[in-house]
Each structure stands twice: as C-alpha cells, then as structure tokens.
Amino acid sequence: MTGVDLTADLGRGVLLPNPVLTASGCAANGKELHRVRDIAELGAFVTKSVKREPQSGRGTPRMAETPSGMLNSIGLQGPGIDAFVTHDLPWLAAVGARAVVSIAGASSQEFAEVAQALVQAPDIAAVAAIEVNISCPNVANRGLVFACDPGSSSEVLRLVAAQVPESIPLFAKLSPDVTDIVSIAAAALEGGAHGLTMINTLLGMHIDIDARRPHLFGGTGGLSGPAIRPVAVRAIWQVHAAMLAGRIPRAPIIGVGGVRTGLDALELTLAGASAVQVGTAIFNDPSAPWRVAHELASWLQSHGVNRYRDLVGAAHES
Amino acid sequence: MSEVPAPIAQVSATVLANRRVGAYHQITLDAAEIAVAARPGQFVALAVGGSTSSLLLRRSFSIHRTRPETDGSVEIVVADAGPGTHWITALAPQAQVDMLGPLGRGFPLPASPGAAVLIGGGYGSAPMLWLADVLRGNGIEVHHILGAATADRLFGVDLVAPEDGLIVTTDDGSQGQRGRVTDPLTELLHRTGAATIYACGPMPMLAAVTGVAQAHGATAYVAVEEAMACGIGVCMTCVLPVRGGDGITRMTRSCTDGPIFEGGSVRWEAIANGRVAVPSDALGAPAGTR
C-alpha cells in the first residue's frame, strides 16, 4: 500500500513489514495456506504449537460450530520438534516466510527442550520470534494450565529464555481464563518473556442433545472466532494500561482473538497491540490474513495515518 | 520439497441453477477456474451466509459434474441438514457464494483393466457418474450400485449411462432391491470379475464395502464424509486413523490426504457412533488412549 508505513515492531530489533500474522493452530505449518496466497507476504507466519514428540491429537469430533465462533479440541496434533526442524522450518525458510514458532510442552522442562532443539536448527535465521504457548486449554493436565498460575508461567519462560539467544524475542501466549491477566502478564515478563500474545481461546463446551453427551471427543474445547473479540480487546487494554501506568514492564503485545477484518485489527491495535494475528477467520476465508492487511492499510491511507505504529495503544490517550 | 501442490482457487461463484432432485438440491455454479482443474472425487468448500455471517465454517461437497468446455460450471448435490446447508439450498440463481476448489485428491484409476463397481449411498452417488465417464473413457467396464434408505434419498438413478450396469437398493424396498448396497456386491464381483470398487457414502457403508472387497481380494477406494471446518488442511478437524505405506497409523486429514482412501488402510474399528478414537498404536497416541 503506497504511502503508508505498515512496519510492526516486535522489539529486540525485530521489525515486520506489516502487522498481520497468522494465529497458531489456524494455518498448520504453512504449506497448505501457501496454495491460496504467498505466505512470505504476511508480517509473519505463526506455526502450530510443537512439542518434543509427535502428537496424534485427540479423537473426533474435534470441532463444533458456535454463534460467530467455534470450539476446537485438536490436542496439539503435530510432528514433534525434530521433524519440525527437519521438514517444516526448512520449507518456511525456502519460501522466504518469517516464522514465529509456537512451542508447547506438558512440563516446563519439555518447553525448554523444545526451545533448545529449535535454536540449534540450521534454519534458525528464518525464526523471527518464538511464541511460548503456556495457555492452550487443550493440553490435558488435570485441567491445569500453566497460564493460569503466575509461578508456573514465570518458570516456563525462565527455562525457555535460558535456551534462546537474545536476538530472538520470546512471546508468552496468555489465556483469558484467569481472574487477573495483568498478574500473569507480569509473571511471564518477569520470567523472561520479551512480549505477550493475547489471547488464547476460552474454554467452552457443547452438548450433543440427540446423543445426550458432550459433542467433542475431548469433552471441552477452546472457543475462538469473532465471538471472543471483545474479550481480546479487554485483555489487551488491561495489560497495556498496566504498562502505561508503570505497574508492569513495557513490552510489545501481539493481539489475537476474533479478528476478521481490517477494522477488527485496528481495534486491537488501538487497545495496545503492536501486531495482530488472524486465526479462526482463516477457516471461513483462507485469504483473510492478506485481506485484513489490505483493509488495514486502506483505512490508514484514507484516514491520513502515515505510520501503523502511531496507533498502537492510541485509545489510551484520550 | 520437490512436491509443489496445485494452487487452490477461491472464487465468488454465481449460482446458475438450483433444482430440487428428490430429497436433495442439485446446484450449478459458475466457477470456470475450478471446473477446468477438477477431477472426479475432488470437492469444493462453500462459505455460508456472506462476509458477516455468524456461521464461520465452510461446508464441503464432492463435485458432481464439471462443464469446463461449455459454461465453466461446477455442480454439487446438497442435502438440507442444518442451518448452513439450509442457506446453501435456498440460494437463488444469480446469487454469489464464496467457493474454494478443487480440493482433495481425486479417485485413482484402477491398477488393472477390466470391470469396476461404483457404489453410491444416498447422495454419495454424486461423484460416481462423472467417475464412470472417466473410467469408461479408459476402457473400464462400469457397474453401479446405488442405494439409500428410501427411494427419495436415491440420487442419480436416471443419470446412469445405458451401457453401464445398474443395481438399485433401498432399505425399505421402495425402489429396487430391498436391502443394503453390500447385499448384491458379492454376486456382482463374482459375475463381473471386478477387482476395483469405488464407494462414497456413510462411514458404516464404507466399512462394510471394504470388508466385502477384502474378502474377495478386491481393492476398495472409499470417499469419506468427515466433518470439515476449512477444507484446505489447516484446521485439523477432519482426521481419521489411516495406516500408511510404512505400516504406521497416523491421524490423517480427510481433506488434503483424502477424501479418497484405500479402504484397507482405514482403521474402521476406531470409528463408531459418529466418533473416531485414536488407536493406541497410532503415531504419537497419548498413553492410555481410550
């Protein structure tokens, strides 16, 4: 888009040519979406959360459609970190994509091992950032999620940060299913996160009335889609406000949750996001990440805004 | 990295016609880009309700016919089974619908010449008539079995080419033989010497067809109907346990790796009552899988 500077700043010297990313788990590891549009044009491509070992994921049904959203219970199906660095990351590097690699684990040690294997990958130069998925509600651990406990959140980030060079920013992906998201954000930053991704899905459930049982094979699932966008806006707002007030350290926020249009991306930006991910909207429209970037740029141009970065958190100024 | 998959077209397709056929709607869409590239067994995924719809997930339909040479149209057969398909079946001529395609892998040709049996359960027959044309063009003798619960849920009986064999079954006997599609299958395999079966329909039917095929040393290619959210391989919801050439079972996407599978590779024992469990020996299966 001519005349508009769309550069997004993720901190630690990482600049993206535009602020629109895919959301983890909504675009697989790139090859599939690349059949629709060139993923190198995206601000960055966020991969599916990868664990140490291959994961089969859960049985099916794995999804349920809900009003303006969906529930998913995939179970982090994936190849494991060794296959990821052997097959997926080289492909992302070869097509020129900027990768944000999402890592997951059932223990803080597993997170650290995945990070260690990742940073040793020959194609590590293609990795713009690492997103630490401490909040996926699908990781069954007696219902406990790292991101629901400040101590666990801090511990994971501390162990991962010890493995990762300073040049690669670490983003902790936070769950909205907490009483006080600011305290979790503070703990993640204290542990070693350089930034925050907000928000992951909300835990939900759907009952199959005819069968009189939970519809999803896994019972519960993560709610995503436009239905949760106001929750994302609120979470980003609260954490950015805490940063402005000096209650927690200043750090970039990647906004995610229900973004379907350029105006949605703008809303998260005004609340305090330095970049925005598009997730569930991809299932509805696989061109959505590119379209959102285009719509965002058009809005900036028509409103005489020369730099995207000038709008980050701008709703807090009035 | 040598494999470069074909691009997927995303088109705003104009509805050319929407006809009621028995219990179904046969919908013709203007989508030349998809029509020229599609092969029998591939499918399209339609968005529901426009760009502000609250129904976000795409609905996938196997392609019934394409007419790349004339009007560039793609035809699908839709059953009105919920709010999404209700919207699609109500589309009037000239309406626009966002469509992705062609998706998935088509039916493979038989490994050997001779005869093939094509089985369609309900509107699972939609892709079979097009497949029959392609097989016949390759010198294969085609025999159809079309089955459904009731006569109004049959599709395509009047569309079968006169040179093809045809057996019709209904559960209630309201048309053709009373019974299931598998009832006449054994005799038909014996009589025709067919070594290849193609089948599309509900999962229990596909499992039963695979069983008959295996008992006769025939190969069954089955087109599965798994619930899909995206159709393009990114949502990971349409998986089935499928044994690969290396003998390892993986939770495999029906959209990108299917929707056609060799019946003997599918772990049918894990599939029951609309649910699919992860076999305990599947790659990466959690310890203590149900």
Image (spheres, coloured by chain):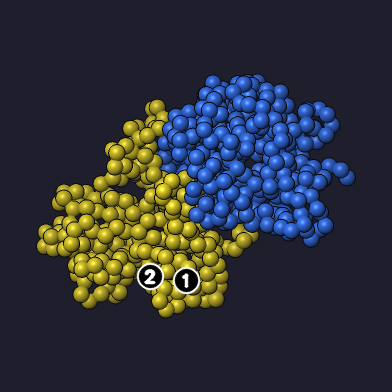
Chain colours: A blue, B yellow
- Asked if residue A46 shows in the view, the reply is yes
On screen, residue B146 above or below A103 = below
- Residue on which the image places disc 1: B32
Nearest to the observer: residue A91 or residue B280 = A91
Q: Position of residue B38 (x, y in %)?
A: 40, 64
Q: Earlier in the sequence, mark 2 or mark 1?
A: 1
Q: State the SS at label 2.
A: strand
Q: Position of residue A72 (x, y in %)?
A: 52, 43
Nearest to the observer: residue B23 or residue B71 = B71
Same chain for the residues under marks 2 and 1 in the image: yes
Between marks 2 and 1, how big is the CA–CA gap? 12 Å
On screen, residue B215 above or below B158 = above
Q: Residues within 10 Å of mark 1 (few under 14, many from 20)?
A: many
Query: Tag 2: residue type?
Result: Arg
Quadrant of the image occupied by residue B42: bottom left
Q: State the SS at label 1.
A: helix
- Asked if residue A176 shows in the view, the reply is no
- Residue on which the image places disc 2: B65
Residue depicted at x 49% and y 76%:
B16
Chain ID, mark 2: B
Query: Tag 1: residue type?
Result: Ala
Residue depicted at x 25% and y 75%:
B161
